[in-house]
Amino acid sequence: MRLPKIDRILSAEGDLQPLLAKTRELRTLAGLVQDFLPPDLARLGRVVNFREAELVVAAANPAAAAKLRLLAPALSRYLSERRWQVNLVSVRVQPNASRFAAVATQKNVRLSTTSLQSLKSLRNRLGEDSPARKALDELLARQARSGGGD
């Protein structure tokens, strides 16, 4: 199997070998945890660390954490069956920052009539295939739906 370029570069650096080994270990464990958990719960939890036979899993919210704590003994057995020395599964609530960022980008903003005219003018100067034009079209359509413009 051929490594992607970044992996080849990192693998060539001796000082990074412990970091790469830890990353591979966490990826493998994360895959096993994802396979074990029901799909809805798997999306709400992620492996964040493994040290001294303790697997640390972050939950997106308290309800998911409670479910993960209930499944922790079975998960530990599942991983042990796959030759991983896991004596303890710790669950911590750690909301995913990207979920909050997505909510923050969906705030309703009302643009002034002057701002809307400037954006329309800019959109009209952009090429038909321009990603920026498509983004402006979406913004302007949202403004129209929300009654934007003063």
Image: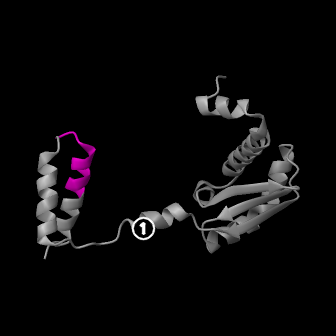
Residue depicted at 17% across the width and 45% down the height: 126
Residue 101 magenta? no
- The answer to which quarter of the image holds residue 19 is top right
Q: Is 136 colored magenta in this rendering? A: yes
**Residue found at the very far bottom of the displayed protein:** 150
Q: Secondary structure at mark 1?
A: helix
In the depicted view, which residue is nearer to us: 67 or 147? 147
Q: Quadrant of residue 119?
A: bottom left
In front: 22, or 13?
A: 13
Q: Amino acid at mark 1?
A: Val
Residue, x 79% and y 54% (percent of image)? Answer: 50
Query: Residue 29 location, x and y as percent?
Result: 74, 47
Quadrant where the image shows the N terminus: top right
Q: Which residue is mark 1?
A: 103
Q: In the rendered view, tell whether residue 67 sits above or below residue 26.
A: below
Q: Is residue 123 left or right of residue 60?
A: left
Give the residue at x 23% y 60%.
139
Query: What residue lies at 21% left-to-right and 39% top-to-bottom?
Result: 129
* Image quadrant occupied by the C terminus: bottom left
What is the span of residues highlighted in magenta in the rendered image?
128-138
Q: Is residue 73 left or right of residue 101?
A: right
Disc 1 residue crowd, few under 14, some 14–19, many 20+, Cα 10 Å: few
The correct choice, above or below, for 78 with respect to 139 in the image is above
- Residue 107 horizontal/vertical position (percent): 34, 71
Residue 125 at x, y percent in the picture: 13, 47
The outermost residue toward the top is 1
Q: Nearer the viewer, residue 120 or 46?
A: 120
